[in-house]
Image: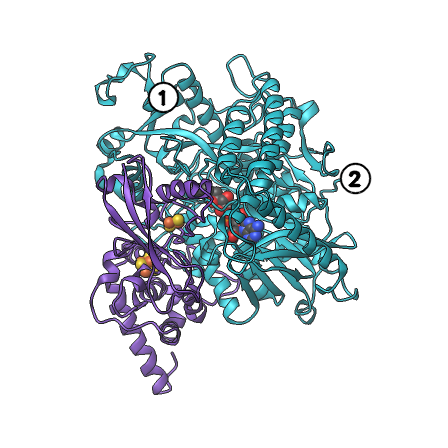
Chain colours: A cyan, B purple
Amino acid sequence: MILDAKIPAGPLEQKWTNFKNNAKLINPANKRKFNVIVVGSGLAGASAAATLAELGYQVDCFCFQDSARRAHSIAAQGGINAAKNYQNDGDSVWRLFYDTIKGGDFRAREANVYRLAEVSRNIIDECVSQGVPFAREYGGELTNRSFGGAQVSRTFYARGQTGQQLLLGAYSALSAQIGLGRVQMHEHTEMLDLVLVNGHAKGIVARNLITGEIKSHAADTVLLCTGGYGNVFYLSTNARGCNVTATWRAYKRGAAFANPCYTQIHPTCIPVAGDYQSKLTLMSESLRNDGRVWVPKKKGDNREPQDIPEEERDYYLERKYPSYGNLAPRDISSRSAKEACDSGRGVGPGGLGVYLDFSAAIQRLGRNTIEERYGNLFEMYENITGESAYERPMRIYPAIHYTMGGLWVDYNLMSNIPGLHVLGEANFSDHGANRLGASALMQGLADGYFVIPNTLGEYLSTQFGGPKITTDLPEFKKTEEEVRERVNKLLSVKGTVPVDTFHRELGLILWDKCGMARTEAGLKEAIAEIKALRERFWKEVCVPGVGAELNQSLERAGRVADFLEFGELMCLDALTREESCGGHFRVEHQTPDGEALRHDDTFASVFAWLYKGEGNEPELEREPLSYEAVHLATRSYK
Amino acid sequence: MNFHLRLWRQKSADTPGRFEGIEATNITPDCSFLEMLDIVNNRLITDGKEPIAFESDCREGICGTCSLVINGVPQGPGRGAACQVYMRKFKDGETIFVEPFRAGSFPILKDLVVNRSAYERIMRAGGFISEHTGGAPDASAILIPKPVADKAMDAAACIGCGACAAACPNSSAMLFVGAKVTHLNLLPQGQPEAKKRARAMVRAMDEEGFGNCSNYYACEAVCPASVSASVIAKLNRDYIKGEVSEAVGAID
Ligand SMILES: Cc1cc2nc3c(=O)[nH]c(=O)nc-3n(C[C@H](O)[C@H](O)[C@H](O)COP(=O)(O)OP(=O)(O)OC[C@H]3O[C@@H](n4cnc5c(N)ncnc54)[C@H](O)[C@@H]3O)c2cc1C
Ligand code: SF4
Ligand code: FES
């Protein structure tokens, strides 16, 4: 199969404009005839569903929570990037584009990223007009902060709750459309499979999580906006319900899964405290604007932080990356923290932590300013750890946070399955091997508000005149039957081991062997261990209750069953990519001073995996990445 | 630590519920309340019993999914949502009552899970600024004084959890509705629909069967997002303006 990215012709700066000038339009009377399924109500899903409904499409939107407003985007803290240059500090579309490409370690598509940088400006306009209360200066202007991987201040924020406010904006637009009857909202409903009719995505099979009813939904096109798969690691900063099920089911129906091994480990999270823990809490990267990261210079120095004199502290990010300092990108900061801890200089329980110290900032700016900027984060930290970060440095450690990999899509956000579009964190498109902070919110909203409304016509315009798709088609009945069988299979194992136990074990395997540092031997072991764990799961898992009721064990079991398959693909991808880039660090491939070593001649490509049936090795397709506007450089933040 | 839990068990919406005693033994104080329930559930499963149904997602107090009444207090002791309650806040050996939110407009679905779709319908009636994607002017075109933006943000912080209605003796949803009306009506972008919004949301709230505010302030006391009860005063003002302007046939 050839993966055609369908990148428009012309110079980089003109591609999106050219595309729009020539895009296929659907007239208003015809839009009403098209039904669109949007799975997901996060930034990507809610913005797409609302905008497409405004344009006149009939939309059905799904989420597994009890309200669209609770999608995981709500938890994003730090901010959203946009090339507005309100600060007059030299920002531009080009600079945001370049920072994102470089931040992604030259493993993302130029044309997509440029478009993202271009529409970033419209996003802020849109959000402000919806009533998103971004932070402002006394004069009434919007204010900005800086984030990792950038030397300009281009991040817009709403206290420490930027994701919440952006999602509430999109959710309010969605609510308006639901009120007008243009969107049918299906809460508490989980997509369990994708339905293909003549090879095109024409619907889904979903389970109502309250009644347990399994039902088909038909449409002319399907948009998956189902978020990332970070929870494959069990402990992550993601919400409990985040899962790979929707994208994994699509993969098993033929959609290519791209770069699954590109996962992001966030440098500033509250360290793991015990095995009872159900999630890790992120401390926003924005804290690194004012916090300084350090460990003691001496190994095993267990004095209290305030008793360690200045000259015995190693501000290792400032030392190693003087031009970016504490704002070095996430992959680099995380790896440096791991190195510091591996060398025996970590702090806190088990030596798995580094300090993030605000004392200098408090002295410089006063406690009030710090409280104004980060008050809610400090409070959260104190609530969880019982320690006040105003008085002693925070202890932080890296944790899984975001997944750059996802379903493969072309420039139109369509996967290789015709009619299947993928938006937001669920696709692989814009962040290459590492995402810069405050760029996921930007991408989710770009995809939903500005990209898909323009690109959807490319597919729908080919769908005129066909027979109306309804759930009476045999394809729906067959897929429904398969979903029922899978549900029954989970219920009938009747073992004794809770689902969580398997999930936790899977997470440990992946964290050790497919986490911050990966080796060939480790990945091979991980694959064997995951296979064995999966076998045990299907023999020993206990899923109490029945299918036709609210059954949370069953929901979880289905998600973990998919993670147990997906984890293996992640490791296979990591094993095949014999280079280091961004968040993917293969120990065998590093420079003498321990930085990631890319091999552009062999690996400047997207790895897209195709399902080839149970028990068979998936097939690898490569989409070569050609760089016309930027020069492939060794990424340096020194 | 060990706790005696008295948990509300209810099979489904139309079956009666009751408290059931369950022991939570050997719990680390650093555990969150929901992690304690996870541990209890996994033990129940291992013993071949049915786990307790309760909802949660973000587990950091922002999504509004978790919805427990702990010892009679919606969202439990301390500030923040139930997922932010840590076991170190309780005494070893304590008896802890855990119930679902109680409000006529939030029917119980199972155990500790309630149906809060009434809030969704209120939002759909007017909790938005009607605008068209792509038609927005430059974000810096309208200056918004910082104190106004800050006040709007204070109100916008509502996580839509429903604790306000669950805490209120009248099951009033006015803190929730007031928060949204205050957020949008304070901003210049929210002005064109300000009166209509207040009118539509209050009417939807009444239709859902929520009661009125009679100044108990129980909502404010439990609100995990610290939304101030002053939003109710703003709601009342804007609602009255809305009703009057409709009654006299004025342009809103
Ligand atoms: C703690 C935290 C902080 C963050 N902070 C920032 C930040 O400051 N800046 C930034 O840019 N990014 C940040 N991110 C990343 C960013 O929040 C996410 O990448 C982004 O919000 C994802 O949006 P989304 O719309 O793609 O998916 P989500 O918001 O995850 O939404 C997924 C949707 O899909 C639905 N869904 C999933 N599976 C199914 C299914 N099988 N059936 C039906 N529905 C389903 C869910 O119900 C949900 O509605 C942060 C992430 C975390 C975890
Ligand atoms: S006002 Fe407070 S208590 Fe009420 S829904 Fe909002 S956050 Fe919850
Ligand atoms: S689980 Fe999200 S607020 Fe408690």
Q: According to the image, label 2 marks what residue?
A: A1
- Viewer-closest of A277 and A20: A277
A517 sits to left or right of A390: right
User: Whole-percent x and y of residue B190?
Assistant: 39, 66
Asked where in the image residue A389 lies, by quadrant, the reply is top left
Q: Amino acid at mark 2?
A: Met
Secondary element at tag 2? loop
- Viewer-closest of B60 and A508: A508
Q: How many marks?
A: 2
The verdict on label 2 being within 8 Å of ligand 1 is no
Secondary element at tag 1? helix
Q: Amino acid at mark 1?
A: Gly
Q: How far apart are labels 1 and 2 at the CA level?
A: 49 Å
Asked where in the image residue B29 lies, by quadrant, the reply is top left
Identify the disc placed on residue A350: 1
B90 sits to left or right of A602: left
Q: Residue at x 45, y 68 (%)?
A: B124
Vertical arrangement, residue A450 with respect to residue A152, above or below: below
| Extreme residue toward the bottom, this view | B248
Q: Residue at x 35, y 69 (%)?
A: B104
Vertical arrangement, residue A297 with respect to residue A126, above or below: above
Tell me which chain the residue with mark 1 is part of: A
- Viewer-closest of A446 and B107: B107
| Extreme residue toward the front, this view | B48
